[in-house]
């Protein structure tokens, strides 16, 4: 057992105080009026539980209000209900207090941390998934969106525990179990979780009290072992200087123990100021900027490309241009993967395929780029490659020679030439014109949209209808770049 004892422990559960919780709810209700007279804004969402005459209220503050000192509680994820017997409000789910990244606010600057926190400092790898809260109800059922994953877990037969026992245990502890759901089959984020690594990772047990109180990681891991849950690895350091050195060294590679990680969450004790004698549970995080900002950028530009839009980006221009060139060829060869990617599957597979071809880790590419070893495209757009298709859109009047010029260009360069006058009239002509342009791009590198195109809506038709007419496969292998002068 560690000498470190946080405010809440499994051996000494703290019960809710009705007066304290009623006061908290009353204060939050003041904030429902868009902060008038409260100094903060608050939103309440009501859920009726299936098969029960019970309503649960979810409370949420504006993100920018968490940097103020006027909130009645700093919990992110707070659910209450009114006990029908006593009429008192009760907390039924309690998330962590909002915690900030290093240097994000005054209280996460290293000078403040060194003066106003004390160890041991428990640090855990920042898992990359969705936060899930689970708590127990009086009928021995579980409350929480993630209960379906609890039902799917095979821990019951393995450790001889039932869901009802889990519910009763959490209710006796007056506590919420906090998990990270990491499951690439549900949705991919930035880091990969193989099938044998997917699931609910227990990383916290919080007491149902307005002032943040959480159990230390040794007890959390024992609880996970009892119920056969996945554990979040944690380690301890006893002084700020060692902690700072470790975090900064890990940030250089964006990895720990040979595995890419997004960063770390650090748990410790803090006080408001050196004159304050009251210590409380407190978290901060140390997120790695790179290569994860680059990975997110790759994900977003790929989605733009697949939707027929021109990818825009401001950072990592050189390597992102290379990545997009690779991605175009990748989807041209694997058109069946387009829909999967748009539904957040295959993101990591594509990224890893590019890195494997490049023969480097993401952190190594960032380092080379920072040292000036990689060219930058200042436009912030995808570099032109042989896979990029062009549509030339003249803006002209009748009899100025646009058709004569188009015929000459098409014969010289084997470009497509679509004449609007050759198509049958009627309301469907714009669609037929756009489809004919797209069809010509299947065999030509460029196409000329031979029409006056002097009105803005005519040019918009080519963009909008061209993307629709292209079909999913065509949109993944080409970008419509349209010079209008």
Image (cartoon, rainbow, N blue to C red):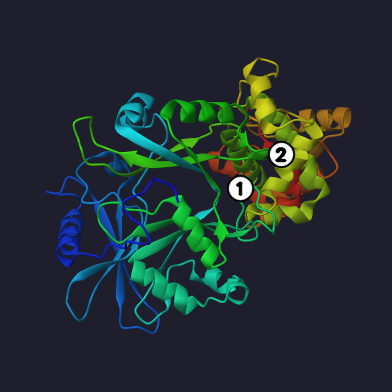
Residue 219 located left or right of residue 32:
right
Q: Nearer the viewer, residue 385 or 67?
A: 67
Of pointers 1 and 2, the one earlier in the residue sequence = 2
Residue located 20% across and 62% down the image: 21
Secondary element at image label 2? strand
| Badge number at residue 464 | 1
Answer whether residue 57 is visible to the viewer in this image: yes
State the image coordinates of residue 54 (x, y, percent, origin top left): 30, 79
Q: Position of residue 161 (x, y in %)?
A: 53, 76
Front: mark 1 or 2:
1
Check the image and report above or below for 254 versus 204: above
The residue located at (62%, 42%) in the rendering is 299
Which of these two is toward me, 471 or 180?
Answer: 180
Q: Where the C terminus falls, by quadrant?
A: top right
Image position, residue 14 (x, y; %): 28, 62
Toward the viewer: 47 or 142? Answer: 142
Task: Determine which quarter of the picture holds residue 378.
Answer: top right
Q: Residue furthest top?
A: 372
Q: Which of the labelled discs sits on residue 316, or is there none?
A: none
Instruction: Tell me which corner region of the image, top left, top right, bottom left or bottom right, holds residue 187.
Output: bottom right
Q: Compared with residue 413, is residue 278 higher up or lower down, i.e. above or below? A: below
**Left or right position of 140 against 376:** left
Q: CA distance from mark 1 to mark 2?
A: 14 Å
Say what secondary structure mark 1 lies in.
helix
Identify the residue position indicated by label 2 in the image: 449
Q: Taking 301 as reference, is 345 above or below it? A: below
Coordinates of residue 12 in the picture (x, y in percent): 32, 61
Kindly check if marks 1 and 2 are in contact, taking CB atoms under 8 A apart as contact: no
Residue 372 shown left or right of residue 355 in the figure: left
């Amino acid at each position: 057992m560690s000498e470190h004892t946080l405010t809440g422990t499994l051996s000494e559960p703290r019960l809710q105080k009705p007066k304290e919780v009623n006061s908290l709810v009353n204060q939050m209700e003041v904030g429902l009026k868009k902060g008038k007279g409260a100094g903060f804004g608050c939103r309440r969402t009501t859920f009726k539980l299936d098969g029960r005459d019970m309503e649960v209220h979810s409370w949420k503050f504006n993100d920018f209000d968490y940097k103020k000192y006027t909130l009645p509680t700093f919990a992110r994820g707070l659910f209450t209900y009114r006990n029908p017997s006593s009429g008192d409000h009760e907390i039924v789910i309690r998330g962590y207090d909002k915690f900030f990244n290093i240097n994000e606010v005054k209280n996460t600057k290293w000078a403040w941390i060194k003066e106003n926190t004390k160890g041991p400092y428990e640090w855990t790898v920042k898992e990359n998934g969705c936060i899930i809260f689970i708590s127990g109800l009086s009928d021995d059922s579980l409350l929480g969106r993630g209960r379906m994953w609890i039902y799917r877990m095979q821990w019951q037969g393995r450790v001889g525990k039932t869901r009802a026992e889990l519910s009763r245990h959490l209710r006796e502890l007056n506590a919420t179990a906090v998990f990270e759901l990491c499951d690439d089959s549900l949705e991919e984020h930035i880091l990969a979780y193989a099938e044998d690594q997917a699931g609910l990772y227990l990383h916290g047990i919080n007491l149902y009290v307005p002032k943040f109180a959480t159990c230390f990681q040794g007890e959390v891991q024992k609880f996970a072992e009892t119920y056969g849950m996945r554990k979040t690895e944690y380690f301890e350091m006893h002084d700020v200087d060692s902690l700072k050195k470790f975090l900064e060294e890990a940030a250089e590679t964006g990895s720990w123990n040979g595995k890419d990680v997004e960063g770390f969450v650090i748990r410790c004790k803090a006080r408001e100021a050196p004159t304050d004698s009251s210590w409380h549970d407190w978290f901060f995080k140390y997120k790695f900027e790179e290569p994860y900002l680059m990975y997110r950028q790759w994900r977003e530009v790929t989605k733009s490309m697949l939707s027929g839009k021109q990818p825009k980006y401001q950072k990592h221009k050189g390597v992102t241009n290379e990545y997009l060139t690779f991605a175009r060829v990748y989807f041209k060869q694997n058109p069946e993967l387009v829909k999967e990617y748009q539904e957040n599957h295959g993101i990591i597979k594509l990224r890893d395929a590019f890195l494997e071809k490049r023969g480097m880790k993401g952190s190594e590419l960032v380092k080379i780029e920072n040292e000036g070893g990689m060219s930058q495209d200042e436009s912030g757009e995808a570099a032109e490659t042989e896979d990029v298709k062009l549509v030339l859109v003249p803006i002209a009047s009748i009899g100025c020679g646009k058709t004569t010029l188009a015929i000459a260009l098409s014969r010289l360069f084997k470009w497509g030439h679509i004449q609007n006058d050759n198509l049958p009239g009627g309301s469907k002509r714009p669609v037929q014109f756009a489809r004919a342009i797209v069809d010509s791009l299947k065999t030509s590198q460029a196409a000329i949209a031979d029409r006056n195109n002097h009105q803005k809506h005519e040019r918009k038709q080519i963009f909008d209808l061209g993307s629709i007419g292209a079909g999913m496969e065509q949109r993944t292998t080409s970008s419509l770049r349209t010079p209008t002068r």
